[in-house]
Image (cartoon, rainbow, N blue to C red):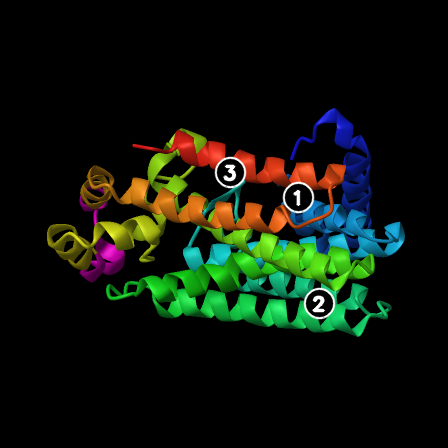
């Protein structure tokens, strides 16, 4: 993520975390070293480390400890992406072939496991028990979110509640934990910790909904994958769930799912277009904006300092992206 000039000190923090990630992965066994470094060098916005670093400025900041925590959180995120790609059968990640597509599912699984293990190893000398508990709980819920998604593949009757629970476990809780851990490490007041946690939670929910909407609005040139890829792989996201309140759309999605892996691209395109012709995308945006509004409510309760404005800008960025997706 490109930071404004007034936050150059935070960019330096992110650069330090990138170096720690590179150093940690460079020491990996040769069997996994190149793959891990390639994944790291593929880029990414480093939103989760940045949130941890930013949150640490709301207290008595300890740079060395915060860098380590931000590194751990990014390793957890990287591991989850590898496992997520396996479950989603994704072939492209950040314009590069996914690990399982380039090598094998088994190799990718072990690579993801290794990154989780490396994150666990780095936590060994962290003395704050609450941080250990938060990390353990977050990884547990992340795994449950992935298993829930896999279990619901090609199942047509998914409730809105189940969808929201899935994105809570898969995305929002990790982002919330990034914010809270940064504050805990800086010994911020409990009210600040709490507000940062809920800011991260609401931001994470909006982020995932926005990403799910993008699956129907961004072009293949932008993403490297066809529109409606989640639906093609058998997963119901918010736009589809809202569109299926129309019985005709429901019937077409149901038929589509019954085709399983044998479905044709013509049928895929037809179902995706039917969903886009409803008002589902715009209705999904309302959900995202609601979560962004809740995130802003939490931000307003934080102390007035420069980092608060950066968090506000993150909300504004997502809101702007949402507005560009209105159909």
Query: Which residue is at the front of the view, 67 or 33?
Result: 67
Task: Work out how far the residue at label 2 is from the one at label 3, CA to CA, in angstroms.
Answer: 32 Å
Query: Does residue 58 appear to the left or right of 48 in the view shown?
Result: right
The residue tagged 3 is 318
Residue 139 in view: yes
Which tag, 2 or 3, sits closer to the chain's start? 2
Q: Quadrant of the C terminus?
A: top left
The span from disc 3 to disc 1 (Cα, nearest Å) is 15 Å
Could you say where residue 113 lies in the image, as x and y percent from the top left?
Answer: 63, 66
Q: Which residue is mark 1?
A: 46
Q: Is residue 220 left or right of residue 295?
A: left
Between circles 2 and 3, the one closer to the viewer is 3
Q: Nearer the viewer, residue 227 or 245?
A: 245
Q: In the structure shown, which secondary structural element does the residue marked by tag 1 occupy?
A: loop
x then y, percent, for residue 27: 81, 55
What residue is drawn where x is 40% and y is 40%?
A: 214
The magenta region covers: 257-268
Q: Residues within 10 Å of mark 3 (few under 14, many from 20)?
A: some
Tag shown at residue 117: 2
Using the numbered discs, state the Cα–Cα distance from disc 1 to disc 2 in whole angstroms: 20 Å
Estimate the x, y position of residue 232 in percent, counting from the top left.
Answer: 30, 50
Magenta span contains residue 261 = yes
Q: Residues within 10 Å of mark 1 (few under 14, many from 20)?
A: some
Q: Position of residue 248 (x, y in %)?
A: 11, 51
Would you place residue 158 above or below residue 242 in this image? below
Q: Which residue is drawn at the image coordinates 39% and 34% (left, top)? A: 218
């Amino acid at each position: 993520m490109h930071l404004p000039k007034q936050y150059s000190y935070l960019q330096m923090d992110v650069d330090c975390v990138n170096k720690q990630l590179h150093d940690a992965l460079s020491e990996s066994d040769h069997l996994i070293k190149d793959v891990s470094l390639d994944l790291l060098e593929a880029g990414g916005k480093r939103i989760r480390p940045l949130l941890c670093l930013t949150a640490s400025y709301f207290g008595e900041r300890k740079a060395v400890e915060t860098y380590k925590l931000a590194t751990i959180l990014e390793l957890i995120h990287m591991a989850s992406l590898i496992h997520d790609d396996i479950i989603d059968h994704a072939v492209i990640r950040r314009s590069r072939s996914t690990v399982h597509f380039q090598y094998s599912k088994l190799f990718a699984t072990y690579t993801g496991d290794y990154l989780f293990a490396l994150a666990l190893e780095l936590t060994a000398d962290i003395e704050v028990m609450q941080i250990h508990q938060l990390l353990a709980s977050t990884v547990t819920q992340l795994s449950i979110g992935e298993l829930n998604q896999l279990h619901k593949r090609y199942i047509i009757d998914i409730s809105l509640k189940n969808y929201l629970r899935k994105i809570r476990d898969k995305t929002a809780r990790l982002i919330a934990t990034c914010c809270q851990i940064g504050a805990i490490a800086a010994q911020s007041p409990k009210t600040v910790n709490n507000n940062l946690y809920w800011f991260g939670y609401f931001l994470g929910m909006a982020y995932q909904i926005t990403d799910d909407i993008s699956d129907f609005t961004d072009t293949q040139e932008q993403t490297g994958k066809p529109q409606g890829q989640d639906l093609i792989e058998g997963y119901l996201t918010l736009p589809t769930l809202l569109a299926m309140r129309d019985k005709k759309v429901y019937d077409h999605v149901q038929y589509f799912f019954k085709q399983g892996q044998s479905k044709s691209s013509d049928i895929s395109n037809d179902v995706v277009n039917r969903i886009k012709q409803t008002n589902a995308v715009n209705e999904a945006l309302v959900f995202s904006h609601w979560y962004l509004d809740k995130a802003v409510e939490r931000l307003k309760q934080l102390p007035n300092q420069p980092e608060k404005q950066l968090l506000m800008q993150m909300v504004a960025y997502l809101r702007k992206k949402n507005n560009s997706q209105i159909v």
